[in-house]
Image (cartoon, grey):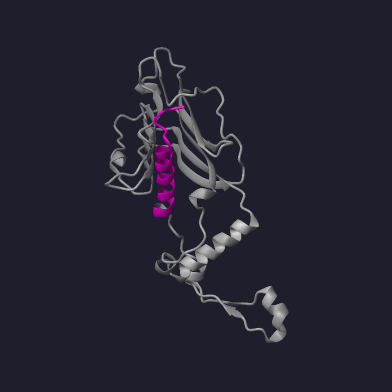
Amino acid sequence: MNRNLSQTGIAAGICALACAYSNGACAAESLAATQPPQPLTPAFLAAAGGSDAQPVHCEPVDDDVLAHQTGKYAGSDMISGVVLNVISQWNLPNGATATAQGALTVVTNTVNQLSASVQTSAKVTDPVAGGTTTANSGAAPSNTATGGQNVSVNGVSQVTQVAGNNNVGSNAASIDYTNSSGSGASLANVANTPSASASNANGTIRAGIAFGGNGISVTLQTPAGIATQNIMPSNTAQAGSIAQLLQVAGNNQQVANQLSLSLQTQQMSAQMIRQAGVLQALRNIR
């Protein structure tokens, strides 16, 4: 276990992810906003009032109104564990590959204390003798893809910059809830260390991942560009953020960044649910 992963650090990482989605989420325009409201009659009203039941009219609500509404949420006392997985992979047209992945698992033990573990792995394969060269890597030296590293966002940032043909790239990040209370993720053939790195013979392809400073950094570097993922804790200048970046200056490249966060929730009794509902109702009234 990495000593840098204190409970405060873990909380900062989770806050970074939670704030990122609350600050960076975008509400798609509803179809209802482009059409006149239609009267609806729910089944329970129709059954109770028969033919005399009045229809319920639905009206679209603007985002500025919804932004001030309150409701139920997952409090910190409901979270019993966290599993974070990150992976970046790059496939070059000559068969060379670079992969960096890691997992952070935080679980609640039998005495209701948090324990954390980290796994990391970095791997580079290169079939070209002596190391991949620019000539056979699909890289296009005359093409440039720059500037994405300078993007600063409080929330989620996903930037893709491509200068070339027949490339495939993706940035993906997800958060989900589960009632599972298992031991968490376990990656195959990886070390229980906070960092890992690898490169080919001449250093033209590199892969690295590091957990530290209450954040996470993943970097792939190839002759045709870079792929990075960063989770940065909050500071006095900005809130925490997640940043995924792809920069491809070449042809026939396949590259992907993936991040997934699973929040494990405790089972709540019926009495606890009622108490939480009453408390939130009182807060709304106030």
Judging depth in this view, the residue of 48 and 264 nearest the camera is 264
Q: Is residue 116 above or below residue 51?
A: above
Residue 65, percent across and down?
Answer: 42, 69
Q: In the figure, residue 246 lies in which quadrant?
A: top left
Judging depth in this view, the residue of 115 and 128 nearest the camera is 115
Q: In the figure, residue 181 lies in which quadrant?
A: top right
Question: What span is in magenta?
Answer: 1-23
Q: Residue at x 39, y 16 (%)?
A: 131
Q: Is residue 18 above or below residue 45?
A: above
**Left or right: 79 with respect to 208?**
right
Majority SS type along the magenta span: helix
**Left or right: 56 with respect to 100?**
right
Residue 93 visible in image: no
Judging depth in this view, the residue of 64 and 40 nearest the camera is 64
Q: Quadrant of the C terminus?
A: bottom left
Q: In the figure, residue 135 lies in which quadrant?
A: top left
Q: Is residue 95 above or below residue 274?
A: above
Residue 258, percent across and down?
Answer: 48, 38
Residue 119, percent across and down?
Answer: 49, 27
Residue 40 visible in image: yes
